[in-house]
């Protein structure tokens, strides 16, 4: 398990797996008793959760911003983003800091999750597409599904997730 407050710089072991397929590395994390994954190349670091400064009229799932060594970084609560129930105990939650291309530049954002599991390697061929979910807008964030010992791991397209979460229009307050 990765310790909060440390950088993630995995050695590139994108060789091939047992069946000869290319490997991709993912950071696995938990959210509401479900495992999720994001491509490790997008992960900058993992930090202990901290209080974010709320911004006026920000979407409900954007907790606010934190200071990350002089850079202002927005923090997205993935429980709120995905419509999952809130938790009372915030102490064990962590922020996964990711860096993604957005509008022609790299953007850093934090993803508040329940806990981080591990960095794992998966053969690209073992990822399965998500089934059609009708009009569920959050389905656009699913990159695929992978099998783990605990069940299915939902692999997220972190670029789409951050872009949609930070560019979503907000409803102005009623007068």
Image (spheres, rainbow, N blue to C red):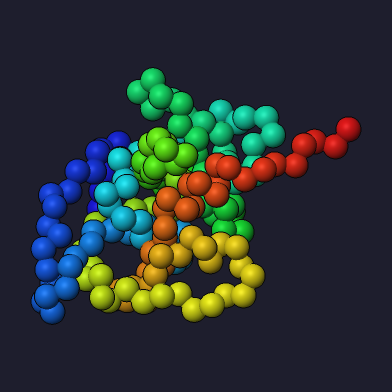
Pick the front one: 41 or 6: 41
Q: Which quarter of the figure has residue 46?
A: top left
Q: Where's residue 24, x and y in %?
A: 23, 62
Give me the residue at 47% from left, 39% from top: 103
Q: How many marks?
A: 0
Q: Which quarter of the figure has residue 28?
A: bottom left
Q: Where's residue 120, x and y in %?
A: 23, 62
Outermost residue on the right side: it is 175
Decide: is 134 above or below 119: below
Outermost residue on the top side: it is 70
Outermost residue on the front side: it is 104
Can see residue 125?
A: yes
Q: Is residue 8 left or right of residue 57?
A: left
Q: Is residue 60 left or right of residue 111?
A: right
Q: In this view, does 2 lie to the left or right of 156?
A: left
Decide: is 102 above or below 129: above
Pick the front one: 8 or 161: 161
Can see residue 52?
A: no
Q: In this view, does 64 lie to the left or right of 103?
A: right
Q: In which quarter of the image is the C terminus?
A: top right
Q: Where's residue 118, x and y in %?
A: 26, 57
Q: Where's residue 5, x and y in %?
A: 30, 36
Give me the residue at 36% from left, 41% from top: 99
Decide: is 131 above or below 44: below
Decide: is 22 above or below 56: below
Give me the residue at 11% from left, 63% from top: 15
Give me the residue at 85% from left, 37% from top: 174
């Amino acid at each position: 398990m990765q310790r909060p407050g440390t950088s993630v710089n995995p050695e590139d072991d994108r060789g091939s797996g047992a069946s000869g397929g290319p490997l991709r590395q993912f950071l696995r994390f938990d959210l509401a008793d479900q495992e999720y994954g994001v491509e490790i190349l997008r992960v900058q670091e993992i930090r202990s959760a901290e209080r974010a400064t709320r911004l006026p009229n920000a979407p409900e799932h954007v907790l606010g911003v934190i200071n990350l060594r002089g850079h202002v970084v927005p923090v997205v609560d993935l429980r709120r983003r995905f419509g999952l129930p809130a938790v009372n105990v915030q102490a064990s939650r962590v922020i996964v800091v990711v860096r993604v291309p957005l509008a022609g530049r790299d953007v850093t954002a934090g993803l508040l999750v329940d806990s981080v599991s591990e960095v794992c390697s998966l053969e690209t061929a073992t990822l399965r597409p998500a089934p059609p979910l009708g009009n569920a807008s959050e389905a656009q964030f699913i990159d695929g599904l992978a099998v783990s010992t605990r069940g299915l791991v939902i692999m997220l397209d972190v670029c789409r997730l951050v872009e949609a979460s930070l560019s979503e229009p907000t409803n102005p307050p009623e007068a």
